[in-house]
Image (cartoon, helix red, strand yellow):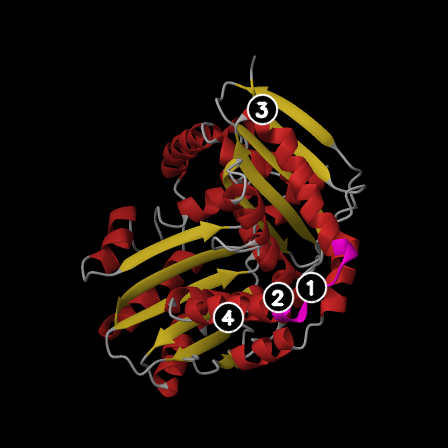
Amino acid sequence: MIINPEPEIFSLKNGIRILQQKSHENGITHCCFIVNRGSRDEDDGVNGLAHFIEHLLFKGTEKRNSYQLLNRLESVGGEINAYTTKEQTCIHASFLNEHLERAFELISDIAFRSIFPEHEMEKEKGVILDEIESYNDLPEEQILDQFDEIIFPDHALGRNILGTPESVTALKKSDIEDFIQTNYTSDQVVFGVHGNVSGSKLKNLAEKYLGDLANSTRDHKRIEPKIAAKNNTKVFKSINQAHVIMGVQSYSLHHKNKKAMLLLNNFLGGPGLTSRLNLNIREKFGLTYTIESGYYPYSDCGIFEIYFGTDPEKVNRCLRLIHKELDALRKKNLGGLMLDQAKKKFIGQIALAEEGRLNVLIGSCKSLLEQDKVEPLKHSISLLNKISADELREIANEVFDLDLMSTLQFLPKE
Protein backbone atom coordinates (compact mmCIF):
# COMPACT_ATOMS: atom_id res chain seq x y z
CA MET A 1 0.00 0.00 0.00
CA ILE A 2 1.39 3.40 -1.03
CA ILE A 3 0.91 5.92 1.76
CA ASN A 4 1.80 9.59 1.48
CA PRO A 5 4.32 10.74 4.10
CA GLU A 6 2.97 12.57 7.12
CA PRO A 7 2.68 16.32 6.55
CA GLU A 8 4.93 18.83 8.25
CA ILE A 9 3.24 21.74 10.00
CA PHE A 10 4.54 25.08 11.23
CA SER A 11 2.91 28.33 12.37
CA LEU A 12 3.71 31.92 11.52
CA LYS A 13 3.86 34.51 14.31
CA ASN A 14 0.39 35.74 13.33
CA GLY A 15 -1.12 32.28 13.91
CA ILE A 16 -1.55 31.18 10.29
CA ARG A 17 -0.59 27.53 9.97
CA ILE A 18 1.32 26.14 6.99
CA LEU A 19 0.97 22.46 6.10
CA GLN A 20 3.47 20.81 3.77
CA GLN A 21 2.87 17.44 2.15
CA LYS A 22 6.18 16.48 0.54
CA SER A 23 6.41 14.75 -2.80
CA HIS A 24 9.41 13.57 -4.79
CA GLU A 25 7.69 14.14 -8.13
CA ASN A 26 9.09 16.99 -10.17
CA GLY A 27 5.96 17.75 -12.20
CA ILE A 28 2.90 19.16 -10.48
CA THR A 29 2.41 21.04 -7.21
CA HIS A 30 -0.92 21.71 -5.51
CA CYS A 31 -1.70 24.32 -2.91
CA CYS A 32 -4.76 25.46 -1.04
CA PHE A 33 -5.98 28.15 1.31
CA ILE A 34 -8.76 27.19 3.71
CA VAL A 35 -10.54 29.40 6.21
CA ASN A 36 -12.69 27.74 8.84
CA ARG A 37 -15.78 29.74 7.94
CA GLY A 38 -18.74 28.87 5.73
CA SER A 39 -22.44 29.41 5.27
CA ARG A 40 -23.36 28.32 8.81
CA ASP A 41 -21.42 31.33 10.12
CA GLU A 42 -23.64 33.85 8.35
CA ASP A 43 -25.91 36.10 10.38
CA ASP A 44 -29.65 35.91 9.84
CA GLY A 45 -30.72 37.83 6.76
CA VAL A 46 -27.50 37.43 4.76
CA ASN A 47 -27.94 33.82 3.59
CA GLY A 48 -25.56 33.11 0.70
CA LEU A 49 -22.95 35.64 1.83
CA ALA A 50 -20.04 33.19 2.27
CA HIS A 51 -20.61 31.78 -1.23
CA PHE A 52 -21.00 35.30 -2.65
CA ILE A 53 -17.64 36.27 -1.15
CA GLU A 54 -16.02 33.20 -2.71
CA HIS A 55 -17.17 34.44 -6.15
CA LEU A 56 -16.07 38.02 -5.52
CA LEU A 57 -12.58 37.08 -4.32
CA PHE A 58 -11.67 36.67 -8.01
CA LYS A 59 -13.12 40.03 -9.12
CA GLY A 60 -10.30 42.35 -8.16
CA THR A 61 -7.58 43.02 -5.59
CA GLU A 62 -5.60 46.10 -4.66
CA LYS A 63 -3.27 45.52 -7.62
CA ARG A 64 -5.11 43.24 -10.08
CA ASN A 65 -8.40 43.26 -11.96
CA SER A 66 -10.40 40.08 -12.54
CA TYR A 67 -8.72 39.24 -15.86
CA GLN A 68 -5.25 39.61 -14.36
CA LEU A 69 -6.21 37.35 -11.45
CA LEU A 70 -7.51 34.59 -13.69
CA ASN A 71 -4.67 34.92 -16.20
CA ARG A 72 -1.90 34.84 -13.61
CA LEU A 73 -1.89 31.01 -13.43
CA GLU A 74 -3.76 30.16 -16.62
CA SER A 75 -1.03 31.87 -18.65
CA VAL A 76 1.42 29.19 -17.48
CA GLY A 77 -1.02 26.30 -17.77
CA GLY A 78 -2.11 26.26 -14.14
CA GLU A 79 -5.59 26.07 -12.66
CA ILE A 80 -7.21 27.93 -9.78
CA ASN A 81 -10.65 27.49 -8.32
CA ALA A 82 -12.63 27.81 -5.08
CA TYR A 83 -15.62 26.40 -3.27
CA THR A 84 -17.74 27.07 -0.20
CA THR A 85 -19.21 24.54 2.23
CA LYS A 86 -21.27 25.00 5.37
CA GLU A 87 -18.13 25.27 7.49
CA GLN A 88 -15.22 26.24 5.19
CA THR A 89 -14.18 28.33 2.23
CA CYS A 90 -11.33 26.99 0.09
CA ILE A 91 -9.17 28.37 -2.71
CA HIS A 92 -7.01 25.77 -4.46
CA ALA A 93 -4.56 25.71 -7.35
CA SER A 94 -2.54 23.21 -9.37
CA PHE A 95 0.49 24.12 -11.50
CA LEU A 96 4.00 23.15 -12.58
CA ASN A 97 6.44 23.04 -9.66
CA GLU A 98 8.41 26.01 -10.97
CA HIS A 99 5.41 28.31 -10.47
CA LEU A 100 4.93 27.78 -6.72
CA GLU A 101 5.85 31.35 -5.77
CA ARG A 102 3.51 32.72 -8.43
CA ALA A 103 0.65 30.65 -7.05
CA PHE A 104 1.49 31.42 -3.41
CA GLU A 105 1.51 35.15 -4.05
CA LEU A 106 -1.68 34.98 -6.13
CA ILE A 107 -3.69 33.08 -3.52
CA SER A 108 -2.53 35.38 -0.72
CA ASP A 109 -3.49 38.38 -2.88
CA ILE A 110 -6.97 36.94 -3.54
CA ALA A 111 -7.59 35.82 0.04
CA PHE A 112 -6.42 38.93 1.88
CA ARG A 113 -6.34 41.87 -0.54
CA SER A 114 -9.58 41.60 -2.50
CA ILE A 115 -11.47 44.90 -2.81
CA PHE A 116 -14.95 43.62 -3.84
CA PRO A 117 -15.78 46.22 -6.53
CA GLU A 118 -19.46 47.18 -6.33
CA HIS A 119 -19.99 47.00 -10.11
CA GLU A 120 -18.69 43.41 -9.99
CA MET A 121 -21.01 42.67 -7.07
CA GLU A 122 -24.07 43.48 -9.15
CA LYS A 123 -22.85 41.35 -12.08
CA GLU A 124 -22.05 38.44 -9.82
CA LYS A 125 -25.46 38.58 -8.16
CA GLY A 126 -26.94 37.83 -11.58
CA VAL A 127 -24.58 34.88 -12.00
CA ILE A 128 -25.58 33.44 -8.63
CA LEU A 129 -29.29 33.99 -9.29
CA ASP A 130 -28.86 31.96 -12.49
CA GLU A 131 -27.00 29.32 -10.45
CA ILE A 132 -29.93 29.13 -8.01
CA GLU A 133 -32.43 28.76 -10.87
CA SER A 134 -30.33 26.06 -12.50
CA TYR A 135 -30.05 24.26 -9.18
CA ASN A 136 -33.82 24.35 -8.73
CA ASP A 137 -34.13 22.33 -11.94
CA LEU A 138 -32.31 19.40 -10.29
CA PRO A 139 -34.65 17.64 -7.84
CA GLU A 140 -31.94 15.14 -6.84
CA GLU A 141 -29.87 18.11 -5.58
CA GLN A 142 -32.70 20.27 -4.33
CA ILE A 143 -34.05 17.54 -2.07
CA LEU A 144 -30.75 17.40 -0.15
CA ASP A 145 -30.98 21.05 0.87
CA GLN A 146 -34.66 20.87 1.68
CA PHE A 147 -33.93 17.87 3.89
CA ASP A 148 -31.26 19.89 5.71
CA GLU A 149 -34.02 22.37 6.58
CA ILE A 150 -35.96 19.50 8.18
CA ILE A 151 -32.99 18.09 10.13
CA PHE A 152 -31.67 21.53 11.18
CA PRO A 153 -34.82 23.70 11.49
CA ASP A 154 -34.31 27.38 12.31
CA HIS A 155 -30.54 26.92 12.17
CA ALA A 156 -27.88 28.09 9.74
CA LEU A 157 -26.93 24.49 8.87
CA GLY A 158 -30.40 24.10 7.40
CA ARG A 159 -29.97 26.94 4.92
CA ASN A 160 -28.92 26.57 1.30
CA ILE A 161 -25.28 27.55 0.75
CA LEU A 162 -26.28 29.54 -2.35
CA GLY A 163 -28.84 31.62 -0.47
CA THR A 164 -32.21 32.69 -1.85
CA PRO A 165 -32.93 35.17 -4.66
CA GLU A 166 -34.15 37.64 -2.04
CA SER A 167 -31.17 37.31 0.30
CA VAL A 168 -28.57 37.43 -2.50
CA THR A 169 -30.16 40.48 -4.11
CA ALA A 170 -30.08 42.34 -0.79
CA LEU A 171 -26.38 41.72 -0.01
CA LYS A 172 -24.26 44.86 0.45
CA LYS A 173 -20.54 45.57 0.45
CA SER A 174 -20.72 46.30 4.19
CA ASP A 175 -22.04 42.74 4.73
CA ILE A 176 -18.94 41.39 2.99
CA GLU A 177 -16.54 43.58 4.95
CA ASP A 178 -18.18 42.67 8.28
CA PHE A 179 -18.06 38.94 7.49
CA ILE A 180 -14.41 39.05 6.40
CA GLN A 181 -13.34 41.03 9.47
CA THR A 182 -15.22 38.75 11.84
CA ASN A 183 -14.45 35.39 10.27
CA TYR A 184 -11.20 35.50 8.28
CA THR A 185 -9.08 35.48 11.42
CA SER A 186 -5.50 34.26 11.27
CA ASP A 187 -6.08 31.50 13.83
CA GLN A 188 -8.71 29.98 11.52
CA VAL A 189 -6.55 29.85 8.37
CA VAL A 190 -4.42 27.02 6.97
CA PHE A 191 -2.28 27.25 3.83
CA GLY A 192 -1.24 23.88 2.40
CA VAL A 193 1.27 22.80 -0.25
CA HIS A 194 1.71 19.34 -1.80
CA GLY A 195 4.78 19.11 -3.98
CA ASN A 196 8.52 18.75 -4.33
CA VAL A 197 9.60 21.83 -2.40
CA SER A 198 12.10 22.26 0.41
CA GLY A 199 10.91 23.23 3.86
CA SER A 200 13.15 26.28 3.94
CA LYS A 201 11.77 27.59 0.65
CA LEU A 202 8.20 27.14 1.84
CA LYS A 203 8.92 28.96 5.10
CA ASN A 204 10.48 31.85 3.19
CA LEU A 205 7.45 32.12 0.90
CA ALA A 206 5.05 31.94 3.82
CA GLU A 207 6.86 34.72 5.67
CA LYS A 208 7.11 36.82 2.51
CA TYR A 209 3.43 36.67 1.51
CA LEU A 210 1.57 35.89 4.73
CA GLY A 211 3.90 36.93 7.56
CA ASP A 212 2.92 40.61 7.58
CA LEU A 213 -0.79 39.91 8.12
CA ALA A 214 -2.24 40.88 11.47
CA ASN A 215 -2.62 38.37 14.29
CA SER A 216 -6.34 37.91 14.93
CA THR A 217 -8.47 35.37 16.75
CA ARG A 218 -12.07 34.27 16.59
CA ASP A 219 -14.10 35.65 19.47
CA HIS A 220 -17.41 33.85 18.92
CA LYS A 221 -18.53 30.23 18.87
CA ARG A 222 -20.84 28.37 16.57
CA ILE A 223 -24.32 27.61 17.85
CA GLU A 224 -25.01 23.89 18.08
CA PRO A 225 -28.32 22.86 16.49
CA LYS A 226 -31.10 21.28 18.52
CA ILE A 227 -32.35 17.76 17.78
CA ALA A 228 -35.26 18.05 15.36
CA ALA A 229 -38.56 16.27 15.85
CA LYS A 230 -39.44 13.51 13.39
CA ASN A 231 -40.91 14.95 10.20
CA ASN A 232 -42.47 13.11 7.25
CA THR A 233 -43.15 15.40 4.31
CA LYS A 234 -44.36 14.89 0.75
CA VAL A 235 -43.83 17.56 -1.89
CA PHE A 236 -45.53 17.30 -5.28
CA LYS A 237 -43.52 18.69 -8.17
CA SER A 238 -43.47 18.75 -11.97
CA ILE A 239 -41.18 15.71 -12.22
CA ASN A 240 -41.48 12.21 -13.65
CA GLN A 241 -39.49 10.21 -11.11
CA ALA A 242 -39.78 10.13 -7.34
CA HIS A 243 -36.87 11.30 -5.19
CA VAL A 244 -36.79 10.24 -1.54
CA ILE A 245 -34.44 10.98 1.35
CA MET A 246 -34.58 9.84 4.95
CA GLY A 247 -32.26 10.42 7.86
CA VAL A 248 -31.46 11.89 11.25
CA GLN A 249 -28.84 13.92 13.13
CA SER A 250 -25.69 11.94 13.91
CA TYR A 251 -22.19 12.23 15.38
CA SER A 252 -19.87 15.22 15.13
CA LEU A 253 -16.27 15.24 13.90
CA HIS A 254 -15.07 14.88 17.48
CA HIS A 255 -17.33 12.04 18.58
CA LYS A 256 -15.70 8.77 19.61
CA ASN A 257 -18.05 6.86 17.29
CA LYS A 258 -17.17 8.83 14.15
CA LYS A 259 -14.85 6.23 12.59
CA ALA A 260 -17.19 3.34 13.31
CA MET A 261 -20.07 5.36 11.85
CA LEU A 262 -18.04 5.99 8.69
CA LEU A 263 -17.41 2.26 8.37
CA LEU A 264 -21.05 1.37 9.02
CA ASN A 265 -22.27 3.91 6.48
CA ASN A 266 -19.82 2.63 3.88
CA PHE A 267 -21.06 -0.93 4.42
CA LEU A 268 -24.70 0.12 4.22
CA GLY A 269 -24.75 2.46 1.24
CA GLY A 270 -21.31 3.72 0.38
CA PRO A 271 -19.73 3.89 -3.10
CA GLY A 272 -19.55 0.74 -5.19
CA LEU A 273 -22.06 -1.86 -6.29
CA THR A 274 -21.63 -4.17 -3.29
CA SER A 275 -23.10 -1.96 -0.57
CA ARG A 276 -25.95 -3.57 1.34
CA LEU A 277 -28.57 -1.17 -0.03
CA ASN A 278 -27.37 -1.44 -3.61
CA LEU A 279 -27.26 -5.25 -3.56
CA ASN A 280 -30.58 -5.81 -1.82
CA ILE A 281 -32.70 -3.10 -3.42
CA ARG A 282 -31.21 -2.15 -6.78
CA GLU A 283 -29.53 -5.37 -7.90
CA LYS A 284 -31.87 -7.94 -6.33
CA PHE A 285 -35.20 -6.29 -7.13
CA GLY A 286 -34.37 -3.62 -9.71
CA LEU A 287 -36.42 -1.06 -7.78
CA THR A 288 -34.16 2.00 -8.02
CA TYR A 289 -31.78 3.51 -10.50
CA THR A 290 -29.74 5.00 -7.67
CA ILE A 291 -29.56 4.41 -3.93
CA GLU A 292 -26.89 5.52 -1.47
CA SER A 293 -26.33 6.54 2.11
CA GLY A 294 -24.17 9.32 3.49
CA TYR A 295 -22.74 10.37 6.83
CA TYR A 296 -21.51 13.96 7.06
CA PRO A 297 -19.93 15.05 10.37
CA TYR A 298 -19.71 18.74 11.25
CA SER A 299 -17.81 20.43 14.07
CA ASP A 300 -20.62 19.99 16.61
CA CYS A 301 -23.12 17.58 15.04
CA GLY A 302 -23.60 15.42 11.97
CA ILE A 303 -26.20 14.05 9.61
CA PHE A 304 -26.90 10.53 8.35
CA GLU A 305 -29.15 10.10 5.33
CA ILE A 306 -30.28 7.63 2.69
CA TYR A 307 -31.31 8.84 -0.77
CA PHE A 308 -32.90 6.95 -3.64
CA GLY A 309 -34.66 7.71 -6.92
CA THR A 310 -37.34 5.44 -8.32
CA ASP A 311 -40.69 5.18 -10.08
CA PRO A 312 -43.45 6.70 -7.91
CA GLU A 313 -45.31 3.40 -7.53
CA LYS A 314 -42.18 1.74 -6.10
CA VAL A 315 -41.50 4.24 -3.30
CA ASN A 316 -43.31 2.41 -0.51
CA ARG A 317 -41.71 -0.93 -1.32
CA CYS A 318 -38.26 0.68 -1.37
CA LEU A 319 -38.91 2.24 2.02
CA ARG A 320 -40.02 -1.10 3.48
CA LEU A 321 -36.85 -2.78 2.20
CA ILE A 322 -34.64 0.01 3.55
CA HIS A 323 -36.34 -0.28 6.94
CA LYS A 324 -35.67 -4.00 6.83
CA GLU A 325 -31.96 -3.45 6.20
CA LEU A 326 -31.70 -0.93 9.02
CA ASP A 327 -33.55 -3.25 11.41
CA ALA A 328 -31.22 -6.12 10.49
CA LEU A 329 -28.17 -4.06 11.43
CA ARG A 330 -29.79 -3.13 14.73
CA LYS A 331 -30.78 -6.66 15.70
CA LYS A 332 -27.82 -8.79 14.69
CA ASN A 333 -24.05 -8.40 14.66
CA LEU A 334 -22.21 -8.61 11.38
CA GLY A 335 -20.50 -11.96 11.00
CA GLY A 336 -16.71 -12.11 11.28
CA LEU A 337 -16.13 -12.60 7.55
CA MET A 338 -18.59 -9.86 6.58
CA LEU A 339 -17.03 -7.41 9.04
CA ASP A 340 -13.54 -8.22 7.76
CA GLN A 341 -14.66 -7.66 4.16
CA ALA A 342 -16.33 -4.36 5.08
CA LYS A 343 -13.10 -3.13 6.68
CA LYS A 344 -10.93 -4.21 3.73
CA LYS A 345 -13.25 -2.50 1.27
CA PHE A 346 -13.32 0.77 3.21
CA ILE A 347 -9.57 0.80 3.87
CA GLY A 348 -8.91 0.08 0.19
CA GLN A 349 -11.08 3.02 -0.85
CA ILE A 350 -9.26 5.30 1.59
CA ALA A 351 -5.87 4.12 0.27
CA LEU A 352 -6.92 4.68 -3.35
CA ALA A 353 -8.01 8.19 -2.48
CA GLU A 354 -4.39 8.89 -1.48
CA GLU A 355 -3.60 9.06 -5.21
CA GLY A 356 -5.69 12.21 -5.51
CA ARG A 357 -2.99 14.53 -4.18
CA LEU A 358 -5.05 17.72 -4.22
CA ASN A 359 -7.89 16.05 -2.34
CA VAL A 360 -5.41 14.59 0.16
CA LEU A 361 -3.95 18.06 0.72
CA ILE A 362 -7.35 19.69 1.20
CA GLY A 363 -8.43 16.89 3.54
CA SER A 364 -5.30 17.30 5.65
CA CYS A 365 -5.77 21.07 5.89
CA LYS A 366 -9.41 20.65 6.88
CA SER A 367 -8.44 18.14 9.54
CA LEU A 368 -5.87 20.55 10.95
CA LEU A 369 -8.49 23.31 11.10
CA GLU A 370 -11.22 21.16 12.57
CA GLN A 371 -9.29 18.91 14.93
CA ASP A 372 -5.89 20.59 15.37
CA LYS A 373 -4.16 17.50 14.02
CA VAL A 374 -3.73 15.38 10.92
CA GLU A 375 -4.17 11.72 11.72
CA PRO A 376 -1.67 9.48 9.90
CA LEU A 377 -3.28 7.01 7.51
CA LYS A 378 -1.63 4.08 9.28
CA HIS A 379 -3.23 5.17 12.54
CA SER A 380 -6.66 5.54 10.91
CA ILE A 381 -6.37 2.04 9.45
CA SER A 382 -5.32 0.66 12.83
CA LEU A 383 -8.37 2.21 14.49
CA LEU A 384 -10.70 0.89 11.79
CA ASN A 385 -9.33 -2.62 12.19
CA LYS A 386 -10.10 -2.50 15.93
CA ILE A 387 -13.81 -1.77 15.45
CA SER A 388 -15.95 -4.65 16.65
CA ALA A 389 -19.29 -5.99 15.49
CA ASP A 390 -20.74 -5.07 18.89
CA GLU A 391 -19.73 -1.42 18.37
CA LEU A 392 -21.39 -1.30 14.96
CA ARG A 393 -24.62 -2.78 16.29
CA GLU A 394 -24.69 -0.31 19.19
CA ILE A 395 -24.27 2.56 16.75
CA ALA A 396 -26.94 1.13 14.45
CA ASN A 397 -29.35 1.02 17.39
CA GLU A 398 -28.64 4.63 18.20
CA VAL A 399 -28.62 6.13 14.69
CA PHE A 400 -30.94 3.86 12.70
CA ASP A 401 -33.93 4.33 15.01
CA LEU A 402 -36.93 4.58 12.67
CA ASP A 403 -38.95 6.32 15.37
CA LEU A 404 -36.55 9.27 15.09
CA MET A 405 -35.90 9.32 11.34
CA SER A 406 -37.45 11.96 9.12
CA THR A 407 -38.43 11.36 5.50
CA LEU A 408 -38.86 13.78 2.60
CA GLN A 409 -40.42 12.69 -0.68
CA PHE A 410 -40.48 14.60 -3.98
CA LEU A 411 -43.34 13.06 -5.95
CA PRO A 412 -44.80 13.80 -9.41
CA LYS A 413 -47.94 15.87 -9.55
CA GLU A 414 -50.96 13.82 -10.52
Circle nearer the N terminus (3, 1): 3
How many residues crowd around disc 3 within 10 Å: few (fewer than 14), some, or many (20 or more)? few
Q: Is residue 250 above or below residue 390?
A: above
Secondary structure beneath disc 4? helix
Task: Give me the residue at 79% from left, 46% from top.
Answer: 226
Q: Indicate yes or no whether the magenta region holds residue 331.
A: yes
Q: Check disc 3 and report the residue beneath it.
A: 313
Bounds of the magenta segment: 330-339
Q: Work out whether mark 4 precedes mark 3 in sequence or the reverse, and give the earlier one.
A: 3
x and y percent of residue 181 in the render?
Answer: 56, 54
Quarter location, residue 79: bottom left
Q: Quadrant of the N terminus?
A: bottom left
Q: Quadrant of residue 205?
A: bottom left
Answer with left or right where residue 125 lies relative to residue 14: left
Earlier residue among tags 2 and 4: 2
Mark 1 and mark 4: Cα distance apart in space: 31 Å
Q: Is residue 80 left or right of residue 303?
A: left
Camera-side residue of 191 and 401: 401
Residue 38 x/y as whole percent: 56, 51
Q: Which mark is residue 338?
A: 2
From the image, give the main secondary structure of the stretch colored magenta: helix
To which quarter of the image does residue 410 belong? Answer: top right
**Circle 4 sits on which residue?**
364
At label 1, which amino acid type do we have?
Leu
